[in-house]
Amino acid sequence: MKFKTVAAIVAGMFLSAAVHAVPIVNTNVRPVVLGATPAGEQSLQTVLNSVFGTGAVSAANNQSAAGLWGSATGSATTIPALIIEQTGGAASQKFGMWFGTDTSSIYTVDLFFGGAVGAPNTLQQSAVGIGIGDGQMIISAGPTFQSACGTQVNCGLFSNALINPDSFGFYFVTGAGKIAYSIDSMNQGGVTDFLAFQGGTSTNWIFAFEDGTDNDFQDMVVKVESIQVPEPGSLALLGLALAGAAAASRRKQKQA
């Protein structure tokens, strides 16, 4: 009886782990309705006009449902530029990238620290260079990008098996510590705190974040160059590769 009890407990532990290891699925539904812009702040449409040109991209109608991206260059280099911060929590909010395939295994890397832009309500740019390879990424700033390492940009070399140049998402951390992921299902309550806009057919994107409940989506706006939405075939091949790795692991365990 004792053996059966222990076995049942162990089985329950494995079942619990399997339940919590939920595969990340993009559930984004767009467009969402935008709220009114607070007095004295620039609207999301105004910010989009400043980056892509007046009327080129509609804040209300051109919201992308994408939640994952990959590098659009052979060198796997991308350049995020923090365009504007319009919130009381600007000094402590962050912007970063995440990697992973299920909710129990996510690797996050902050890119911008709070206050990287400077004065709120002013269109300025603080940029960072990122090189991404399998299992590694490097973040750099300095004179080329006019950003300060350590205080504005999280410079350094980062290593983790989950880092993948062909599949990554983005996130925003509010001044209150709430994380807004690029895939709604990863957010508490499945709320939409992230909007993505593509500059026509280019590989330039604008990401807009909401840190509260007014849905103006201009509390932090970031432009990211040289990224693209992974093709469904690429994602399928990635899934097949992961499945193959899991099968190989099981075979080794049986042989052992």
Image (spheres, grey):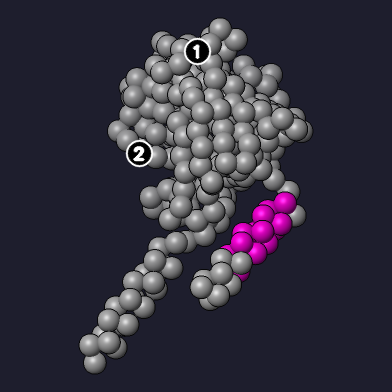
Q: Looking at the picture, does residue 4 appear above or below residue 120?
A: below
Image disc number at residue 123? none
| Residue in the image at 46% along x and 12% along y | 148
Residue highlighted by disc 2: 178
Q: Secondary structure at mark 2?
A: loop
Lateral position of residue 236 relative to residue 46, left or right:
right
Residue 224 on image: x %, y %: 61, 27
Query: Count of labels shown?
Result: 2
Lateral position of residue 254 relative to residue 6, left or right:
right
| Residue in the image at 66% along x and 59% along y | 241
Graded by Cα atoms within 10 Å as few (under 14), some (14 to 19) or many (20 or more), the crowding at tag 1 reads many
128 magenta-colored? no
| Residue in the image at 38% along x and 50% along y | 188
Residue 254 on image: x %, y %: 53, 76
Q: Secondary structure at mark 1?
A: loop
Q: Could you tell me the amino acid type at mark 1?
A: Ser
Magenta range is: 234-247
Q: Looking at the picture, does residue 218 appear above or below residue 166?
A: above
Lateral position of residue 211 relative to residue 60, left or right:
left
Image disc number at residue 147? 1
| Residue in the image at 72% along x and 30% along y | 75
Quadrant occupied by the N terminus:
bottom left
Q: Looking at the picture, does residue 108 appear above or below residue 20?
A: above
Residue farthest to the front, as pictured: 256
Identify the main secondary structure in magenta. helix
Residues under labels 2 and 1: Cα distance? 25 Å
